[in-house]
Image (spheres, rainbow, N blue to C red):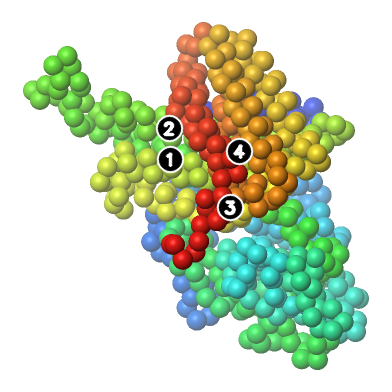
């Protein structure tokens, strides 16, 4: 089964994406136009990305004293991606977009992540521009977002700081009004920023003529003090090169300076930077009510003090993007190890009297344990891809369905986003580990690609919110929000899926297993919060996240298997047998794990929380 076969099945046989063409926004599209987009992206990924995946891993970005140098292949790939129109695929025609469903856009981007996630595509740039389309002024949309959608400019998100990491309440970057007329700038209220940002992907390069940084900073109060916590955080557009209200470069360089490149375990083809704002390396103009007349120029987005609310628009979109990246790295490793297992002879078949050394060797795919590792990868990766495309379909529902359907999609997205980010980043990384194992010693060498896939994928458990952060978001907020309405809605969807699956004799037992798992999750959720103390409930938030995620994936697998039997009730196609086999593996080998995870959640076990530091 190829990646394209899997995507086509999920989009059309399961999610019925073609039906979106009945909505006004997508009325110009048909199955043929969707397929044409997938064809184009698959071809660009095959020609411009895949052949250079190892190259960008070995030729890391470096700073020559004036600019960051990247391989020519990266420039060519980024240009091809921009020219494909994918940066603005989901946007209005007026913004140069295709008004493409997000589910099709997400599926098309999967080809690039599978071919070379290290080269990257446009996730941050598109997310940056999409944020501005929601929270920016009309001028900010026209000047900044439109140039990003065209590929002329690129975008970043600047949240973390060296001393704060993921603790955004401790952001120390300051923003002060730039002179008495700071509110009269057509690009937005103009401020001067000073501070340091770290872990900024694509923070410095020469791939585009400008880089648009979205920066979180705090505006001091009347006494010059920063407001504690996240309430005082605002969001600013800080361009690398200054522009005018017509979107033209003025020739001046903003005071944003590269402080260093981070040297990463994987994902080496994309720059990751430390940036200094307002250090005086590129002083621009005069002004600044702090009396110093220095700092990087930034333009306020939205309301002062509401920056984190704006930034979450980009962060949530990026979390689905991270989930897709993790999924496709796992998928790339699966395909590589499957090919290896089909062609590597080793060992002999077990007969009645044991192994007969006089017999020819068999291929390792004929060994049960190798099949176990391949089935695990298949279940993890195909299940994760289905989850990501389901979430992408919810985005389309939220934006275009209207009424209760749209609101239900919003709630489901709230609950599922932590899973969409965290589950593939853990279990598709495990798939990469199994791909190395299938290769044996060869897998640990750079002669085969699977070690790079693992190194690249290891980042996905960290960025856009670690497992711990996603777990606290899920158990501490998402399952409780609106009196648990989102969790109840998800449970209702699962119950409907169980009823549909039970119509097929081959699936009835799995529907019953899912029902039991759902009940266990519900009981654990209630018991975790039975004391009303967040410290009790959240002490085991990660095991809860793992159990919740496995239950969600079991549901997704059941949904996919049901769709497979609807199209092929006699199970004559190998693709159907493959989907049913992945279901069986997940329910037999994976779903039982939730019992151990939920045991500590239900008991509110404080072993970890109360362990004395000195005892380590």
Mark 1 highlights which residue?
431
Distance in Å between CA atoms under marks 1 and 3: 21 Å
Q: In 3D space, how far apart are the residues under numbered discs 4 and 2 (Cα atoms)?
A: 28 Å
C-alpha gap between disc 2 and disc 3: 24 Å
Q: Residue at x 50, y 81 (%)?
A: 65
Percent across and percent down for residue 611 are 51, 57
Q: Which residue is mark 3?
A: 468
- Identify the residue shown where x is 76% and y is 65%: 230
Crowd tier of the residue under label 1, counting other residues whose Cα lies within 10 Å: few below 14, some 14–19, many 20 or above: many
Tell me, yes or no, whether the two marked residues, 4 and 3, touch with CB atoms within 8 Å.
no
Relative to residue 315, is residue 310 drawn left or right? right
Dot placed on the residue nearer the N-terminal end, 1 or 3: 1
Disc on res. 376: 2
- For the residue pair 424 and 144, the one nearer the viewer reads as 424
For disc 2, the neighbor class at 10 Å (few under 14, some 14 to 19, many from 20) is many
Cα gap from disc 4 to disc 3, whole angstroms:
18 Å
């Amino acid at each position: 089964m190829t990646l394209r076969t899997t995507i086509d099945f999920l989009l059309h046989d399961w999610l019925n994406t073609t039906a979106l063409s009945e909505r006004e926004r997508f009325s110009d599209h048909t199955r043929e136009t969707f397929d044409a987009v997938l064809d184009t992206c698959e071809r660009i990924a095959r020609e411009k990305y895949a052949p250079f995946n190892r190259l960008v891993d070995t030729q890391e970005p470096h700073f020559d004293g004036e600019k960051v140098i990247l391989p020519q292949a990266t420039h060519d790939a980024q240009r091809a991606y921009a020219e494909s129109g994918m940066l603005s695929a989901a946007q209005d025609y007026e913004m140069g977009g295709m008004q493409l469903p997000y589910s099709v856009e997400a599926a098309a981007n999967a080809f690039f992540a599978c071919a070379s996630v290290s080269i990257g595509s446009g996730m941050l740039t598109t997310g940056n521009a999409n944020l501005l389309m929601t929270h920016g002024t009309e001028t900010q949309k026209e000047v900044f977002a439109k140039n990003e959608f065209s590929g002329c400019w690129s975008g970043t998100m600047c949240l973390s700081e060296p001393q704060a990491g993921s603790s955004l309440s401790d952001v120390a970057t300051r923003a002060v009004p730039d002179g008495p007329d700071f509110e009269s700038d057509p690009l937005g209220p103009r401020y001067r920023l000073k501070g340091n940002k770290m872990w900024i992907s694509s923070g410095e390069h020469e791939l585009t003529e400008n880089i648009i940084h979205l920066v979180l900073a705090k505006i001091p109060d009347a006494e010059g003090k920063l407001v504690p916590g996240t309430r005082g955080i605002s969001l600013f557009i800080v361009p690398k090169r200054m522009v005018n209200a017509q979107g033209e470069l003025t020739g001046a360089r903003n005071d944003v300076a590269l402080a260093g490149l981070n040297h990463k375990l994987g994902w080496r083809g994309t720059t990751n930077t430390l940036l200094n704002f307002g250090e005086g390396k590129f002083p621009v103009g005069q002004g600044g009510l702090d009396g110093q007349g220095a700092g990087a120029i930034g333009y306020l987005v939205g309301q002062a003090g509401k920056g984190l609310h704006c930034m979450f628009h980009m962060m949530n979109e990026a979390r689905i993007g991270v989930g897709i990246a993790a999924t496709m790295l796992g998928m790339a490793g699966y395909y590589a190890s499957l090919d290896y297992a089909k062609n590597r002879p080793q060992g002999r078949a077990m007969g009645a009297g044991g192994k007969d050394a006089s017999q020819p060797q068999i291929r390792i795919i004929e060994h049960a344990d190798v099949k176990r590792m391949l089935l695990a990868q298949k279940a993890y990766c195909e299940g994760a891809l289905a989850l990501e495309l389901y979430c992408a379909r919810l985005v389309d529902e939220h934006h275009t369905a209207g009424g209760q359907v749209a609101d239900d999609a919003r709630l489901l997205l709230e609950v599922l986003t932590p899973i969409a980010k965290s589950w593939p980043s853990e279990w598709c990384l495990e798939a990469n580990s199994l791909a190395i194992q299938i290769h044996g010693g060869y897998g640990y060498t750079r002669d085969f690609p699977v070690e790079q896939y693992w190194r690249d994928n290891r980042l996905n458990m960290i960025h856009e919110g670690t497992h711990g952060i996603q777990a606290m978001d899920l158990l501490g907020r998402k399952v409780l929000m609106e009196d648990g309405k989102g969790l109840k809605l998800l449970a209702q969807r699962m119950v409907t899926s169980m009823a549909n699956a039970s119509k097929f004799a081959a699936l009835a037992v799995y529907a019953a297993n899912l029902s039991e798992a759902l009940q266990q999750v519900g009981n654990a959720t209630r018991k975790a919060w039975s004391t009303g103390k967040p410290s009790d409930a959240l002490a085991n938030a990660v095991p809860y996240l793992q159990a919740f995620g496995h239950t969600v994936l079991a549901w997704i697998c059941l949904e996919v298997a049901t769709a497979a039997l609807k199209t092929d009730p006699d199970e004559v196609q190998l693709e159907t047998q493959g989907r049913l086999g992945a279901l069986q593996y997940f329910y037999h080998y994976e779903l039982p794990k939730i019992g151990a995870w939920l045991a500590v959640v239900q008991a509110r076990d404080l072993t970890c929380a109360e362990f004395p530091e000195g005892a380590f």
